[in-house]
Amino acid sequence: MNEYQTIDSGGEKIAVRKNLRVPMRDGVELAADAYQGVDDKPRPALVALSPYGKELQALALTTPPQRRPSPMWDGCIEAGDIARIVKEDYVHVIGDLRGSGHSGGEHIGNYNAGGVSLGQDAYDFIEWVAEQPWCDGNVGMVGISYFGSMQVLAAAERPPSLKAIFVSGGHYDFYETTYHGGIMWFMPRAAREAAAATPAGRSPTASSPA
């Protein structure tokens, strides 16, 4: 099986395969990290995909405990709890979508992979994972927010090896969420905060997507 390095996370040993190259049908390669127990055997895999950077999702494994609230990091792990997933005897595979992180290709704006369906890439990614010697052929998906949305897009493509998804948060209508009136809206949070701070009867200009 592929070589891996071992890290210590709170006294627990975790095997990590870094920067795996995952080929898409058009020749672009996506980057992924795979986390599992140190005994080198095939396991079911849980896949998490986003453009947010796979390295960020592993901070909890190496960052010292922080008080809450922390000025450094709030402890959020949108891809799922790697240590817990590994403890339950899964392989946790976290990938960078095309055009993000260490992956090839183009990522334009939000939910746009340079004309290639994100669901298509998810299909290819899942089927590649299923074929690896460290996976037993069964693949599920985890993660919240963008990671949850990717689960819906992947499931719609019906990859044969995808057995289950767990969408605990996310959205399915990317146009409605991101392109208000056909214009990409970069500041939904700022607009909500401005609206909440505006006296009744007045309309803040920040709330307009245009």
Image (cartoon, helix red, strand yellow):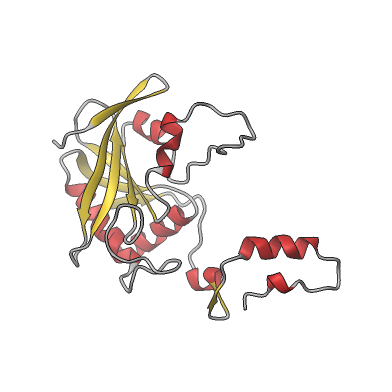
Number of callouts in the render? 0
Q: Residue furthest left?
A: 1
Residue at 29% across, 56% down: 103
Determine whether, in the image, residue 193 is placed left or right of residue 198. left
Q: Is residue 12 above or below residue 206?
A: above
Residue at 21% across, 33% down: 4
Q: Where residue 205 sits in the image (x, y, percent)?
A: 73, 74
Q: Where residue 9 sits in the image (x, y, percent)?
A: 39, 25
Determine whether, in the image, residue 188 is placed left or right of residue 146. right
Choose top left, top right, bottom left or bottom right for residue 18: top left
Residue at 41% across, 60% down: 152
Q: Residue 183 or 34: which is nearer the viewer?
A: 183
Choose top left, top right, bottom left or bottom right for residue 72: top right
Q: Residue 143 or 159: which is nearer the viewer?
A: 143
Q: Residue furthest bottom?
A: 182
Q: Where residue 23 sits in the image (x, y, percent)?
A: 19, 57
> Split into 4 quadrants, where in the image is the N terminus?
top left
> Split into 4 quadrants, where in the image is the C terminus?
bottom right
Q: Where residue 142 sits in the image (x, y, percent)?
A: 40, 47
Residue at 62% across, 65% down: 188
Q: Is residue 46 above or below residue 49?
A: above
Q: Residue furthest front?
A: 71
Q: Is residue 27 above or below residue 102?
A: below
Determine whether, in the image, residue 185 is placed left or right of residue 128. right
Q: Residue furthest top?
A: 11
Q: Is residue 60 above or below residue 170?
A: above
Q: Residue 82 or 105: which is nearer the viewer?
A: 105
